Image (cartoon, rainbow, N blue to C red):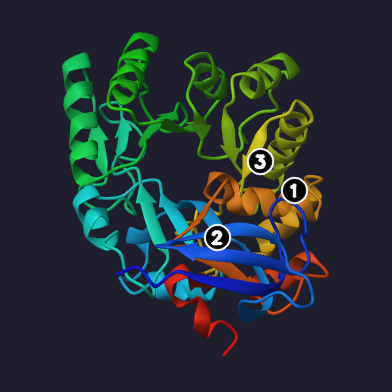
């Protein structure tokens, strides 16, 4: 149930830049920026700092216990995007709770017969959907959509098994677009990032790490509005160096980077990950760049359902680990 309308006076806020004392109006489950708050402004006082909800744009929830969502919220994440799991399990997990991080999900990995990650022991039952034909692509996309998927995840991992032909790749993407779903690609192996870029995939699940891409290819990716999820901290030194070189060139070309950790891949904290923040800084992102990567598309325009709260404006990236996610409907309890 939506909380009653109210005006809040917050000590500080970030909306792409620091705003200082600010007024917000709650309408339903959305918080709307009103303007600066003067010293005598009326409203319910809120201590600390409000920001759009932080999002981890690449997680695998099924590789963690079922009670992971509340720790993610207390760890500073308002939303997570699951990029590969059993769609029926994810649909159940995504049912809203006032205490938990929000979930968007892609459903199963769509891959070629025998393709990645069909042979991986970590892949839960039902988390991989093999596609061998255009008709199969139509059915597979429909299955994910029926489960509630908000995007489609495809696997192009040439080092781990078969990948689709260019023709079948185009069929899969066409079916996703016909369903109104953007496509997120896992690309690994020489030439696979180039294939995803040429096919017009909307997002890469990882900053490309198998090879350093040609400048012209990176320019093309940025020009067509492709977005990359960072996941820089998970890599060993050679792959990390490749990814850092690619992300620097991508951002220089105007590309948009999104914060993501590949949570479920190794031992990672349930919340904002300091190692990933440090990797973003190593890639050249300043505080504004890191915050933009954290809020992604979730932070544009109106602020909905869940927000980020901090006790004070951060003085360095490690302070972001102290953020917590709060519900718009429960702002009166912030700082209590």
**Nearer mark to the viewer, of 1 and 2:** 2
Asked if residue 263 lies left or right of residue 69, the reply is right
- x%, y% of residue 120? 34, 46
Q: Quadrant of the C terminus?
A: bottom right
Q: Secondary structure at mark 3?
A: helix
Q: Is residue 268 above or below residue 254?
A: below
Residue closest to the eye, 284 or 38: 38
Q: Which residue is mark 1?
A: 289
**Nearer mark to the viewer, of 3 and 2:** 2
Residue closest to the eye, 201 or 334: 334
The quarter of the picture where residue 65 lies is: bottom left
Q: What separation in Å lies between label 1 and label 2 (alpha carbons)? A: 15 Å
The quarter of the picture where residue 250 lies is: top right
Q: Is residue 49 above or below residue 220?
A: below
- Say which residue appears at 49% left-offset and 18% top-offset: 200
Q: Secondary structure at mark 1?
A: helix
Q: Quadrant of the N terminus?
A: bottom left
One can see residue 234 in this view: no
- x%, y% of residue 139? 16, 27
What is the number of the mark on residue 53?
2
Of labels 1 and 2, earlier in sequence is 2
Q: Are marks 1 and 3 in contact (CB under 8 Å)?
A: no
Asked if residue 34 lies left or right of residue 88, the reply is right
Q: Residues within 10 Å of mark 3 (few under 14, many from 20)?
A: some
One can see residue 114 in this view: yes
Q: Which residue is mark 3?
A: 239
* Badge count: 3
Of labels 1 and 3, earlier in sequence is 3
Residue closest to the eye, 291 or 218: 291
- x%, y% of residue 305? 43, 62
Asked if residue 237 lies left or right of residue 64, the reply is right
């Amino acid at each position: 149930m939506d909380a009653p309308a109210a005006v809040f006076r917050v000590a500080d806020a970030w909306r792409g830049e620091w705003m200082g004392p600010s007024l917000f109006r709650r309408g339903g489950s959305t918080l709307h920026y009103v303007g600066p708050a003067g010293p005598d402004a009326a409203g319910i006082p809120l201590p600390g700092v409000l920001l759009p909800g932080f999002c981890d744009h690449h997680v695998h929830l099924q590789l963690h216990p079922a009670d992971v969502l509340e720790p993610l919220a207390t760890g500073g994440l308002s939303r997570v995007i699951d990029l590969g799991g059993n769609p029926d399990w994810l649909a159940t997990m995504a049912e809203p709770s006032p205490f938990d991080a929000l979930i968007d999900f892609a459903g199963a990995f769509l891959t070629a017969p025998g393709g990645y990650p069909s042979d991986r022991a970590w892949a839960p039952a039902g988390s991989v959907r093999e596609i061998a034909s255009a008709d199969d692509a139509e059915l597979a996309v429909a299955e994910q959509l029926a489960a509630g998927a908000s995007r489609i995840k495809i696997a192009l991992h040439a080092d781990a098994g078969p990948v689709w032909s260019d023709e079948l790749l185009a069929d899969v993407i066409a079916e996703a677009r016909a369903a109104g779903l953007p496509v997120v690609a896992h690309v690994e192996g020489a030439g696979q990032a180039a294939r995803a870029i040429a096919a017009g995939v909307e997002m890469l699940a990882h900053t490309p790490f198998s090879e350093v891409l040609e400048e012209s290819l990176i320019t093309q990716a940025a020009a067509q509005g492709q977005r990359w999820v960072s996941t820089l901290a998970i890599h060993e030194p050679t792959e990390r160096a490749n990814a850092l070189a690619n992300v620097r060139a991508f951002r220089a070309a105007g590309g948009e980077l999104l914060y993501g950790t590949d949570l479920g891949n190794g031992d990672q904290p349930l919340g904002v990950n300091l190692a990933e923040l440090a990797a973003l800084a190593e890639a050249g992102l300043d505080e504004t760049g890191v915050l933009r990567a954290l809020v992604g598309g979730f932070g544009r325009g109106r602020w909905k359902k869940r927000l980020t709260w901090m006790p004070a404006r951060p003085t360095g990236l490690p302070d972001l680990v102290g953020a917590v996610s709060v519900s718009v409907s429960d702002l009166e309890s912030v700082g209590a």
